[in-house]
Image (spheres, grey):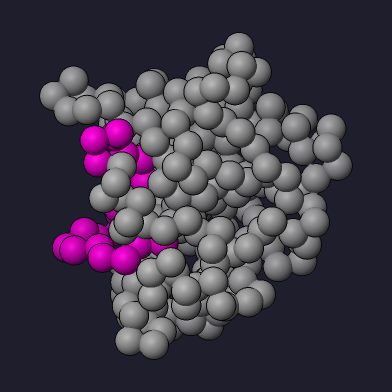
């Protein structure tokens, strides 16, 4: 592991959604292109997608579905954001998704300052997004929280400080979150360069090596399973 990954691995008791839900109530969710069940269903419609998630959780007596890091997905084919014919197809997810109802509290993973925020509109995009800046043992890095509610970015300022575990936002619904079933896209970013309120959460195969190095597996920090 890199120095940052070692630091993240050693941090305990981290949650980024509703702190009252125990990790025992989390269930892995495979949305990869190799999942035949997903490929047979028409999940282009956000309502159908949400019903599928809710049924999946109910049938397994779970409260949160999670997964998706370094996962090749067909979900992005419906969006021009990921399928510009002038570039390589972007279909590899490089964050961790946590699927649960809209309105669920979103928590700051660690002590940090608001680096930036934005309303990233368009089908397949993040919708309201907040990025926090952190510094631990001289390691500066960032955490991104995507698919939030509009209210989440309505009364915040760059530089605001949040304590680990304090409420940062709430999850948005399909009308604002890029037309997805409600979920949090959580991503760790080492170097963010000059971007503001946004950062790629899906990449192409050609760029995968760079993004896996710059965006380590969030579960190193969360330790869900």
Q: Quadrant of the C terminus?
A: bottom right
**Along the line of sight, the residue nearer the viewer: 89 or 17:** 89
Specify whether residue 185 is in view.
Answer: no
**Along the line of sight, the residue nearer the viewer: 111 or 125:** 111
Q: Residue, x 33% and y 86% (percent of image)?
A: 138
Using the image, determine if residue 42 lies above or below residue 3: above
Q: Residue, x 36% and y 40% (percent of image)?
A: 202
Using the image, determine if residue 131 lies above or below residue 114: above
Q: Residue, x 77% and y 30% (percent of image)?
A: 55
Most common secondary structure along the magenta stretch: loop
Across and down, in percent, residue 75 comes to 46, 26
Using the image, determine if residue 180 lies above or below residue 200: above
Residue 199 within the magenta-colored segment of the rendering: yes
Across and down, in percent, residue 204 comes to 29, 34
Q: Residue, x 25% and y 63% (percent of image)?
A: 192
Residue 81 within the magenta-colored segment of the rendering: no
Residue projecting furthest to the front:
1
On the image, which quarter does residue 87 sit in?
A: top left
Residue projecting furthest to the left:
86
On the image, which quarter does residue 124 sit in?
A: top left
Across and down, in percent, residue 104 comes to 65, 56
Using the image, determine if residue 98 lies above or below residue 53: below
Residue projecting furthest to the top:
40
Specify whether residue 224 is in view.
Answer: yes
Q: Quadrant of the N terminus?
A: bottom left
The magenta region covers 188-207
Across and down, in percent, residue 194 comes to 17, 63
């Amino acid at each position: 592991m890199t120095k940052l990954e070692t630091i993240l691995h050693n941090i305990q008791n981290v949650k980024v959604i509703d702190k009252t839900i125990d990790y025992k109530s989390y269930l892995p969710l495979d949305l990869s292109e190799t999942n035949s069940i997903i490929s047979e269903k028409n999940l282009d419609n956000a309502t159908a997608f949400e019903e599928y998630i809710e049924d999946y959780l109910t049938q397994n007596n779970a409260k949160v579905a999670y997964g998706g890091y370094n996962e090749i997905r067909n979900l992005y084919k419906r969006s021009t954001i990921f399928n510009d014919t002038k570039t390589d197809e972007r279909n590899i997810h490089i964050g961790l998704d946590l699927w649960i109802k809209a309105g669920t509290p979103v928590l700051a993973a660690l002590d940090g300052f608001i680096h930036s925020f934005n309303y990233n509109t368009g089908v397949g995009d993040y919708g309201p997004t907040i990025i926090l800046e952190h510094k631990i043992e001289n390691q500066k890095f960032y955490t991104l929280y995507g698919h939030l509610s509009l209210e989440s970015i309505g009364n915040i300022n760059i530089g605001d400080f949040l304590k680990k575990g304090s409420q940062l936002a709430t999850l948005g619904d399909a009308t604002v979150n890029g037309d997805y079933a409600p979920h949090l896209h959580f991503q760790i970013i080492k170097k963010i360069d000059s971007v503001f309120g946004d950062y790629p959460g899906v990449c192409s195969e050609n760029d995968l090596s760079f993004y896996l190095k710059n965006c380590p597996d969030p579960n190193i920090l969360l330790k869900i399973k």
